[in-house]
Image (cartoon, rainbow, N blue to C red):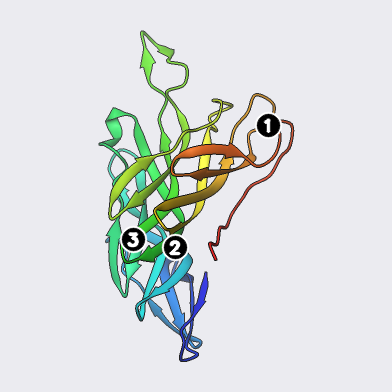
């Protein structure tokens, strides 16, 4: 991710690796500083936005978990302060982890676009159809908003990559699964899903901008 302030300062987000540790990182005019991450965990920045003079970084953090190894969460950093988004419940109820790919900030707050992965639930040793997979979501000021997914297809349902807001409209871009392809570019406008291409196409919509 990259963003430029009115005064010409250039901010870049990504990650930095030291001794096999992955740190979420920001560069201001080429000078790196690491962002906060969970103790013993990792992190990564994928998008950068500037609002009212403040720089926001969007991505994911991974915290050690005794059962899962690492538990990923969608996260954003305001300055160096990390905010982890809720996955929707404790993982034993079916939540594995989440990631964030893009964000947006305006006077109504902070929007984070991403996905949550669900573990398949079982009954009497048999998988329950449709209970696992990857689902698109966005978070508004830390509250998770579910987005209508596609067809459950090989554990892939949908992913949200970016979000923009204007005049009461929340626009999210990403992809959804169909019976024939697991990635068809899609857009959600106030949670209403529209496929940008037909079911037999393959692609991803990764960014949105409202002029």
In the rendered view, would you say 128 is above or below 83?
above
Residue in the picture at 28% in, 28% down:
93
> Which of disc 3 and disc 1 is earlier in sequence?
3
Tell me the distance, in whole angstroms, between the alpha carbons under discs 1 and 3.
Answer: 32 Å
Question: Horizontally, is 151 left or right of 140 in the view?
Answer: right
Question: Horizontally, is 196 left or right of 46 in the view?
Answer: right
The image position of residue 109, as x and y in percent, is: 30, 61
The image position of residue 181, as x and y in percent, is: 68, 31
Residue 63 can be seen, yes or no: yes
Residue to which mark 1 is pinned: 181
The image position of residue 199, as x and y in percent, is: 69, 31
Contact between marks 1 and 2 (CB within 8 A): the answer is: no
**Based on the displayed image, in which of its 4 quarters is residue 91 positioned?**
top left
Tell me the distance, in whole angstroms, between the alpha carbons under discs 1 and 2.
Answer: 29 Å
**Based on the displayed image, in which of its 4 quarters is residue 66 positioned?**
top left
Identify which residue, 115 or 92, lies in the foreground. Answer: 115
Label 3 neighbour load within 10 Å: few <14, some 14-19, many 20+: some
Identify which residue, 163 or 65, lies in the foreground. Answer: 163
Tell me the SS state at disc 3: strand
Tell me the SS state at disc 2: strand
Tell me the distance, in whole angstroms, between the alpha carbons under discs 2 and 3.
Answer: 18 Å
> Which of disc 2 and disc 1 is earlier in sequence?
2
Residue to which mark 3 is pinned: 110
Q: On the rendered image, what quadrant is the C terminus found in?
A: bottom right
Label number found at residue 44 = 2
Question: Horizontally, is 211 left or right of 26 in the view?
Answer: right
């Amino acid at each position: 991710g990259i963003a430029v302030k009115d005064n010409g300062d250039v901010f870049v987000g990504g990650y930095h690796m030291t001794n096999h540790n992955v740190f979420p990182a920001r560069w201001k005019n080429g000078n790196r500083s690491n962002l906060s991450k969970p103790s013993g965990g990792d992190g990564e920045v994928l998008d950068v936005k500037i609002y009212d003079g403040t720089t926001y970084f969007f991505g994911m953090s991974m915290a050690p978990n005794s059962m899962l190894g690492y538990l990923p969460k969608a996260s954003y950093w305001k300055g160096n302060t990390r905010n982890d988004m809720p996955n929707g419940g404790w993982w034993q109820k079916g939540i594995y982890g989440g990631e964030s790919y893009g964000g947006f900030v305006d006077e109504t707050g902070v929007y984070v676009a991403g996905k949550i992965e669900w573990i398949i639930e079982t009954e009497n040793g048999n998988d329950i159809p449709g209970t696992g997979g990857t689902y698109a979501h966005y978070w508004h000021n830390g509250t998770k908003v579910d987005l209508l997914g596609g067809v459950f297809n090989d554990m892939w349902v949908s992913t949200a990559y970016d979000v923009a807001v204007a005049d009461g409209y929340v626009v999210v871009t990403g992809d959804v699964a169909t019976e024939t392809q697991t990635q068809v570019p899609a857009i959600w406008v106030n949670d209403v899903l529209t496929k940008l291409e037909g079911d037999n196409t393959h692609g991803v919509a990764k960014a949105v901008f409202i002029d």
